[in-house]
Amino acid sequence: MTTCPRCNGAGEAGTVMGSVKCWFCKGAGNVNEKQYEMYIEGARLRQLRVDAGMTLKAAAQAAHMPAWYLSKIEHGEAEWPNVPEVKKSMVFPP
């Protein structure tokens, strides 16, 4: 297990309304290695998109996927699809 990158192991996050359970680790404070890697990769892809000045919608269109799915990838909740017509290099340089 690895410390949750979203809440840094606290299991919760402070909001205007008070403390809430971390949505990524579901309050556990840690995640498995695959979840951790997905979160880090998603954050990297999101930063590349923002640095390139692309909107989520534009990047999703370039990658031939719905914007909601690219959002899930950027938040570490989904993996990049393993299909030939949807390549990261179409949107994000290696």
Image (cartoon, rainbow, N blue to C red):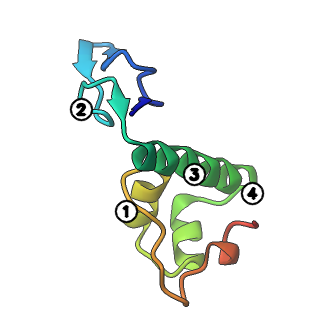
Q: Which residue is mark 2?
A: 26
Spatial CA distance of label 4 from label 2 is 32 Å
Q: Earlier in the sequence, mark 4 or mark 2?
A: 2
> Could you tell me which quadrant the N terminus lies in?
top left
Q: Check disc 1 and report the residue beneath it.
A: 68
Which residue is at a point 52% across and 70% down the rendered structure image?
60
- Which numbered marker is on residue 52? 4
Identify residue type, mark 4. Ala
Q: Quadrant of residue 7?
A: top left
- From this viewpoint, is residue 20 visible? yes
Upstream in sequence: badge 1 or badge 2: 2
Q: Is residue 52 left or right of residue 91?
A: right
Q: Residue at x 59, y 59 (%)?
A: 55
Three-letter code, disc 3: Glu
View extreme (top): residue: 18
Of tags 1 and 3, the one toward the viewer is 3
CA gap, disc 1 and disc 2: 21 Å
53 to 8, vertically: above or below: below
Q: Which residue is mark 3?
A: 41
- Callout 4 secondary element: loop
At mark 2, the secondary structure is: loop
Q: Local crowd at mark 4 within 10 Å, few (<14), some, or many (≥20)?
A: few
Label 2, residues with CA under 10 Å away: few <14, some 14-19, many ≥20? some
Where disc 3 sits, the SS reads helix
